[in-house]
Image (cartoon, rainbow, N blue to C red):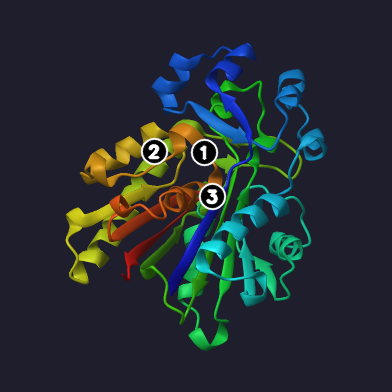
Amino acid sequence: MFVRALGHFHPPNLIDNAFLESLDIGTDDQWIVERVGIRTRHTVLPLDYIRQTRNADPRAAIEAAELSNAETGAAAARMALERAGLTPKDIGLVVAGSCSPDECIPAEACRIAEELGIDAPAFDLGSACSSFCTQLHFLDGMRPDRLPDHVLVVNPDNSTRVVDYRDRSACVLWGDASTAAVVSPRVRGPWKIGHTIMRGDPKGADKVKVPRIGHFTQQGAEVQKFAITRAGETFEALADAFVAQGGPREALTFIGHQANLRMLEAVTRRCEIAPSKHLYNVDRRGNSGAAGAPSVLSERWDDPAVGDAVAMCVVGSGLTWAGALFQRTR
């Protein structure tokens, strides 16, 4: 499986730590940076709406949001298509997945295809924050003759709409973003998928939740421990696969789930990953769910400093975790 291009989109409304401090919820820049290492994050919600309502009723956020998942997903997809030198007519399948879809039905992928004018099958395949690598795992495991030349994989994650801005432990984390990848089973791209992993532990299903109508909640300490452990295990498995193919472990770049910077730093210490081989944007973008890790690679798409191999390791509600090994083809 080849990755022809990645694209990303971050809505323009910016929540900085000074804004969160102005909400008078017992937090400030020092408290936030020390605990999660995040300074700014993006949102589809108007800042005045957050200031006035603290998003106490997330049903109102659906109406208040300035952009839909279809619109932000399509924006990321347009960047990916442009980078790949393709048009919507070249896409033969759309797959989407995230933490907070706009509707139960139709599938989010159908809305994104409609927004882009794509005439092709579309369906959702999601596992919360680990959706992107889970989608790659399934696509990479399919018979190539069952797939079209180009598949569009989209992760529109506008989860600030389900954040309670009276809860400092949650609202300091989340930011909105969307990503899109153009992948192909047979047309070469600048990256190939060399190995994928998908795992799960449904006994932890209650540890991270967003109800149909309600706010995001999590058992923070337990989830942090889980994320560090599973992301580290995933990195080690991908590193082993890379070494088995003849690659030097020290050449492997780590991109983890952008939950918070302190969690990522714990993974790099555990796995002895050099700071120069750790890429992240959570300090500027916040936890943007399924779009977080792929947005890091998309933002560095033309940067040779990324290196020739990337281990992307993501964890999510369910509990689920997944990974993908990206290897340069040129």
Q: Residue tagged by mark 2?
A: 225
> Eyeballing the image, is 272 above or below 121?
above
Check disc 2: other Cα within 10 Å, few if <14, some if 14-19, many if 20+: few
Image location (x, y in percent) of residue 104: 76, 56
The amino acid sitting under disc 3 is Ala
Q: Residue tagged by mark 3?
A: 291
Identify the element where label 3 is drawn: helix
Identify the element where label 1 is drawn: loop
Residue placed at 57% from the left, 21% from the top? 168
Q: Residue tagged by mark 1?
A: 287
The amino acid sitting under disc 1 is Asn
Image location (x, y in percent) of residue 122: 69, 70
Identify the element where label 2 is drawn: helix
Which label is found at residue 261? Answer: none
The amino acid sitting under disc 2 is Lys
Image location (x, y in percent) of residue 224: 42, 36
Residue placed at 71% from the left, 60% from the top? 112
Image location (x, y in percent) of residue 239: 25, 59
Question: In the image, 320: left or right of 24?
Answer: left
* Observer able to see residue 133: yes
Q: Earlier in the sequence, mark 1 or mark 2?
A: 2
Residue placed at 82% from the left, 38% from the top? 63
* Residue 191 in which image quadrant: bottom left
Image label count: 3
Q: Quadrant of the C terminus?
A: bottom left
3D distance between C-alphas at marks 3 and 2:
21 Å
Q: Quadrant of the N terminus?
A: bottom left
3D distance between C-alphas at marks 3 and 1:
9 Å
Question: In the image, 223: left or right of 67?
Answer: left
> Eyeballing the image, is 7 above or below 28?
below
Check disc 3: other Cα within 10 Å, few if <14, some if 14-19, many if 20+: many
